[in-house]
Image (cartoon, rainbow, N blue to C red):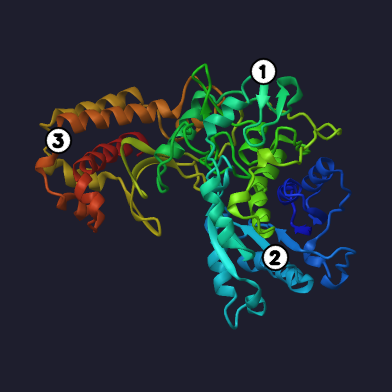
Amino acid sequence: MNAIDLYSGIGGWTLGMKLSEINNVASYEWWYEANQTHNFNFNTNHKEIDIRKINVEDLKFEENIDFVVGSPPCTQFSFANKGGNGDIDDGLVDIYKFLEVVEYLKPKYWAMENVPRVAGILEKELQKGNSLHRFQRLVKTIRIIDSADYGVPQNRKRMIAGDFPVNLFEAYKKKIKHLTLGEVLTSLSGETIIDPNYGYKLLREQVTELENEASLTPQEERINKDAKTYHPIYNKMSFPDKLDRPSRTVTATCTRVSRESIIVKTNKGEYRRLNVRERGVIQGFPITYQFYGRTLNAKFKMIGNAVPPILTYYIFQSMLEVPSSNLLNPTESQYYHETPPHKSVKSNLGLPKRKYPAKRKFKFAVPNLRYGSGVRFELSNDPKSNGIPWSFKFFHGNSKNIKEIKLNQEIKNSLAPVLNTDKNEVFTESIIKIATKYKDYESSKLQKLWTSSDLNTDVFDFLDEVGQCVNKILTEANLEEFEPSLVTSITEESNKKIEVNYASMLAGFYFLSSLNTKLFN
């Protein structure tokens, strides 16, 4: 059987073909480094090509094309791009071209992989009067699947659209073993490396890209942990990542401190990102596969953008109409992926960043005053304003309508007589403690600390001590005797979070308004 793959990337579809003994007639990719990775791994000589500019009538092959597959770029559709505000019309250009090729070649089966959001976009655009209606008869199925259900050691939800035996494909799930992140890390830790996906055995010195970056600095650890466990808007995530389940989704871009980065704990009790080889294995590529990116970030990008070859293997098995009873897993395939003779560029791991821009942004919730779903008290700066002012703020509402309340002298004065703060000593003691210890912590001092390379002094020390005072206030002040209406009079709305947390919110409103007045004028 013969196949071509459009938007072929580094070869996730091609490797699935090889594992299934399907002939790869042609692959099409525009990114040089990804195409080079494909060529070196499969000893091909495909030229970079802008698929948008292909004239389908020029697609002449000696072989009959049985299968057309591919993964059009997902950038414009991804929620990670501008919060989901990418140029959808531009992204649809690639999907249109893909379907145009399918229409022209008339393969027996075809499949397109993309991010889950494309499912709804496809369903809409295939309707009469919309941009893809011409191809409505071609699209027989649109499904959202999790790659982990097909043996990929990663929870990676994808949309699969096309015309292929999808019920047979989904029936395979019952026969497939799930792999965990911990199993991947263990398999790559010994002197003999055993590929958890394919069973290949190599000596450690024969496996490339196993080098780890430096562990996270204390500040990076804190930023990463807060972004995952106390993000002001998004759901809570684990820090470090749990090892007893498939990995979270490997993304094309991440930093040492970003929420998307997968972080594991070292034997020394430190924290680090996954290395190139670990990412490759989690994405389903063999330990012999080489990544020919010129930089570390280029390798991360090409792996994160790839379609898992284990997933494509099972899609091809369904296209070959292999019954579940005869299904083999990838370790039983006759295909062995040899290490390419061409050496990849050794990754420059570098050192953690020590210099930061003068207008570096700070935005973190106050410990003990974090409520999730966008409701929080936070300390933040405003790099767009003159002098980059810092202050404590309160936000409430929902992710689609977040409202800010300024914590100022007016709020402090309105709450003081009600809370009887003159006699409630814990308020006075806490305010004096912070105002005295950090009396010179006006905006310019905090900004200087935040952009400094000296990690011995840190804005988080200040934030944490404020959080400790909050805890003391909550422990010693009997704020439950008051009514939630005190908070709703400030927020001008009532919801479940306010009803449950009104006592701590009262503490936050008064204490942080007082600190804003004393420290930040």
Q: CA distance from mark 2 to mark 3?
A: 74 Å
Q: Amino acid at mark 1?
A: Glu
Q: Which residue is mark 1?
A: 191
Q: Amino acid at mark 2?
A: Tyr
Instruction: Mark 2 or mark 3: name the one nearer the start of the chain.
Output: 2
Instruction: Mark 1 or mark 3: name the one nearer the start of the chain.
Output: 1
Residue drawn 26% across the image and 44% down it: 409
Nearest to the observer: residue 494 or residue 160: 160
Q: CA distance from mark 1 to mark 3?
A: 64 Å
Residue 370: which quarter of the image?
Answer: top left
Q: Which residue is mark 3?
A: 421
- Residue 263 rendering spot, x and y as whole percentages: 53, 32
For marks 1 and 3, give the one nearer the viewer.
Answer: 1
Nearest to the observer: residue 171 or residue 109: 171
Quarter of the figure with the N terminus: bottom right
Instruction: Mark 2 or mark 1: name the one nearer the start of the chain.
Output: 2
**Do the numbered discs 2 and 3 sit on residues whose CB atoms are within 8 Å?**
no
Confirm whether residue 86 shows in the render.
no
Q: CA distance from mark 2 to mark 1?
A: 43 Å
Q: Secondary structure at mark 3?
A: loop
Local crowd size for mark 1, using a 10 Å CA cut-off: few (<14), some (14–19), many (≥20):
few
- Residue 388 rendering spot, x and y as whole percentages: 49, 41
For marks 2 and 3, give the one nearer the viewer.
Answer: 2
In the drawing, does residue 315 fall left or right of residue 344?
A: left
For marks 2 and 1, give the one nearer the viewer.
Answer: 2
**Do the numbered discs 1 and 3 sit on residues whose CB atoms are within 8 Å?**
no
Local crowd size for mark 3, using a 10 Å CA cut-off: few (<14), some (14–19), many (≥20):
some
In the drawing, does residue 434 fall left or right of residue 141?
A: left
